[in-house]
Image (spheres, helix red, strand yellow):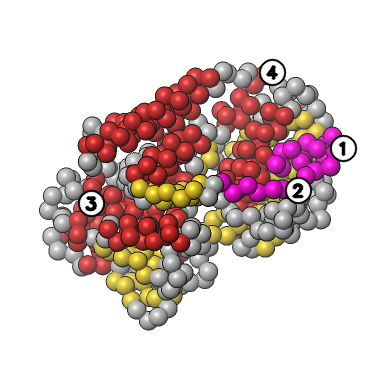
């Protein structure tokens, strides 16, 4: 990377880091958990299932609103004791961000807020008895907030689940990076390998697909070059397959064109208007009959609400999630609420709310206020979504952003992306570590190692 650009990038990161360090120090006041009674002792218990963007925000807001009350207890039950900061996951591919910093610690944050936390996988629920079962235990509630998130959808396409790397779980970035290293090691060992071994197909031309393809480019053309001097990076073929007429269909057309041109500059081949019909271990078969010989396929083309909803007795659409009213209450259940990617939330105007982090956070905050309103015998408010924009990073020096109607791209947009997501991270520790890594990267190339488990 050009040193001047690196310094400018660092300056942006440095300023953000200083501000974030100040915030970190301010927020380091410890909450003493023993000051609060156990969850079961509270007369009004709010159980939040799923501690991601939506569930965490709901818990945080409820705890802040009830700080001086002793009637409302909050518990979060979630599968992991961290939540995944998904917007930074693709950056793990090029080692721009480390996986452990994408994990936002849940337990410590919640305990400090005054909530209880249990790491457990939800098994079922009994709305009559007002009980959720998780990890073989029963958790009672007066109000239940379901925030189980989403997972990849494969649309029944043969071979996708079996042969593709999908963006599922916090280790997805590492798995993609490891695949590239694996192929490089095979190439250096065997000398000659078929072209398919060094062809990477990313299926899905939304923000995640574009970010993954760009990060793959950075890994191959920047980071791995000194480690593998015998492999010409141009032997690696990166292809983005998208079913739509254009990539990034949710962005403004001018930004889409900029992104398209950037991908062309990065030698990422884009195929639009075409779908994968089948994926095998050696190739991707497209619905127009073409075949791409590729042994590395990454699936980013679809998401659906958590499959766990199928085990719960609440009305839901398999793809869109829980059926909720405009107050985010699950249809037919006065005291059960659905938020985030696992709910088919409607805006007060009746329009569907997109499944993204900013919507999930806004829903979490709004549902906390509604739950409290109902507990206090007041009327809940319909949910009003305020779209703030979209940021798509294409490598560490380029982004295409649309923020409150303002469209911008390039290096400044990349700095904005970095500053925004640093600020949005929940963990002060991750903020400082990521900012420090970005500064260090100016002087030392981040090591790319493959930890084989
Ligand atoms: C790679 C990627 C990049 C993204 N980038 C962006 C972006 O740049 N901007 C943006 O706005 N949005 C982005 N999104 C979308 C955004 O991350 C989601 O919309 C957001 O995470 C939804 O929040 P949530 O709380 O509904 O789900 P999540 O944040 O996924 O949280 C769900 C929680 O439920 C828990 N859980 C799941 N099942 C169970 C179970 N059975 N029992 C107990 N707990 C369970 C999980 O452990 C998790 O903590 C991205 C998504 C992905 C996958």
Q: Which residue is mark 4?
A: 35
Among the two numbered marks 2 and 3 on one chain, the one whose residue lies closer to the N terminus: 3
Q: CA distance from mark 3 to mark 1?
A: 60 Å
Q: Which residue is mark 1?
A: 377
How crowded pointer 3 is (Cα within 10 Å; few <14, some 14-19, many 20+) is rated as some
Horizontal side of residue 114 vs 373, given as left or right = left
Q: CA distance from mark 2 to mark 3?
A: 49 Å
Q: Can you give x and y, in whole percent of width and height, for residue 65 in the image?
A: 72, 29
How crowded pointer 2 is (Cα within 10 Å; few <14, some 14-19, many 20+) is rated as some
Which one is in front in this view, the residue at disc 4 or the one at disc 2?
A: 2
The residue closer to the viewer here, 172 or 350, is: 350
Residue pictured at 53% horizontal, 69% vertical: 155
Q: CA distance from mark 1 to mark 4?
A: 27 Å
Residue pictured at 33% horizontal, 60% vertical: 261
Q: Can you give x and y, in whole percent of width and height, for residue 430 in the image?
A: 44, 32
Which one is in front in this view, the residue at disc 3 or the one at disc 4?
A: 3
Which one is in front in this view, the residue at disc 2 or the one at disc 3?
A: 2
Among the two numbered marks 1 and 4 on one chain, the one whose residue lies closer to the N terminus: 4
Quarter the N terminus occupies: top left
Circle 1: element type: loop
**Marks 3 and 2: in contact by CB < 8 Å?**
no
Q: Which residue is mark 2?
A: 382
Above or below for 66 versus 239: above
Among the two numbered marks 3 and 4 on one chain, the one whose residue lies closer to the N terminus: 4
Snapshot quadrant of residue 291: bottom left
Circle 4: element type: helix
Above or below for 169 versus 273: above
Q: Which residue is mark 3?
A: 221
Among the two numbered marks 2 and 1 on one chain, the one whose residue lies closer to the N terminus: 1
Snapshot quadrant of residue 379: top right
Among the two numbered marks 4 and 2 on one chain, the one whose residue lies closer to the N terminus: 4
The residue closer to the viewer here, 330 or 10, is: 10
């Amino acid at each position: 990377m050009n040193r001047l650009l690196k310094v400018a990038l660092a300056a942006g990161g440095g300023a953000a880091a200083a501000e974030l360090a100040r915030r970190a120090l301010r927020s380091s006041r410890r909450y003493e958990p023993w000051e609060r009674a156990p969850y079961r002792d509270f007369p009004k218990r709010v159980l939040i299932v799923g501690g991601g963007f939506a569930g965490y925000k709901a818990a945080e807001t409820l705890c802040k609103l009830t700080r001086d009350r002793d009637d409302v207890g909050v518990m979060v039950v979630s599968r992991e004791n961290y939540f995944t900061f998904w917007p930074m996951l693709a950056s793990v591919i090029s080692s721009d961000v480390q996986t452990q910093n994408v994990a936002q610690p849940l337990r410590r944050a919640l305990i400090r807020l005054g909530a209880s936390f249990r790491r457990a996988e939800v098994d079922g629920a009994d709305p009559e008895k007002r009980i959720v079962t998780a990890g073989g235990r029963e958790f009672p509630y007066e109000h239940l907030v379901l925030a189980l998130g989403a997972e990849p959808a494969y649309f029944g396409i043969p071979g996708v689940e079996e042969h593709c790397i999908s963006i599922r779980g916090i280790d997805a970035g590492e798995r993609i990076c490891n695949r590239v290293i694996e192929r490089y090691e095979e190439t250096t060992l065997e000398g000659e390998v078929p072209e398919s071994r060094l062809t990477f197909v990313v299926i899905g031309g939304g923000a995640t697909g574009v970010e993954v393809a760009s990060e793959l480019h950075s890994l191959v053309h920047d980071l791995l070059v000194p480690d593998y001097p015998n492999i010409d990076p141009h032997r690696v073929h990166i292809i983005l397959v998208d079913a739509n007429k254009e990539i990034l269909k949710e962005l403004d057309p001018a930004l889409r064109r900029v992104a398209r041109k950037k991908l062309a500059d990065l030698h990422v081949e884009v195929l639009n208007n075409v779908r994968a019909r089948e994926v095998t271990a050696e190739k991707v078969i497209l619905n127009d009959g073409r075949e791409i010989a590729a042994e590395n396929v990454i699936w980013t083309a679809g998401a659906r609400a958590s499959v766990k909803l199928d085990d719960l007795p609440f009305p839901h659409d398999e793809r869109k999630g829980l059926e909720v009213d405009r107050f985010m209450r699950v249809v037919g259940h006065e005291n059960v609420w659905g938020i985030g990617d696992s709910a088919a939330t409607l805006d007060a105007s009746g329009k569907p709310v997109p499944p993204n982090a900013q919507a999930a956070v806004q829903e979490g905050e709004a549902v906390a206020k509604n739950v409290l309103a109902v507990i206090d015998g007041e009327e809940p408010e319909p949910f009003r979504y305020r779209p703030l924009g979209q940021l798509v990073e294409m490598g560490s020096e380029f982004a295409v952003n649309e923020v409150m109607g303002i469209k911008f791209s390039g290096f400044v947009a990349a700095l904005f992306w970095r500053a925004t997501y640093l600020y949005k991270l929940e963990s002060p520790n991750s903020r400082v570590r990521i900012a420090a890594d970005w500064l260090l990267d100016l002087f030392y190339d981040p090591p790319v190692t493959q930890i084989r488990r």
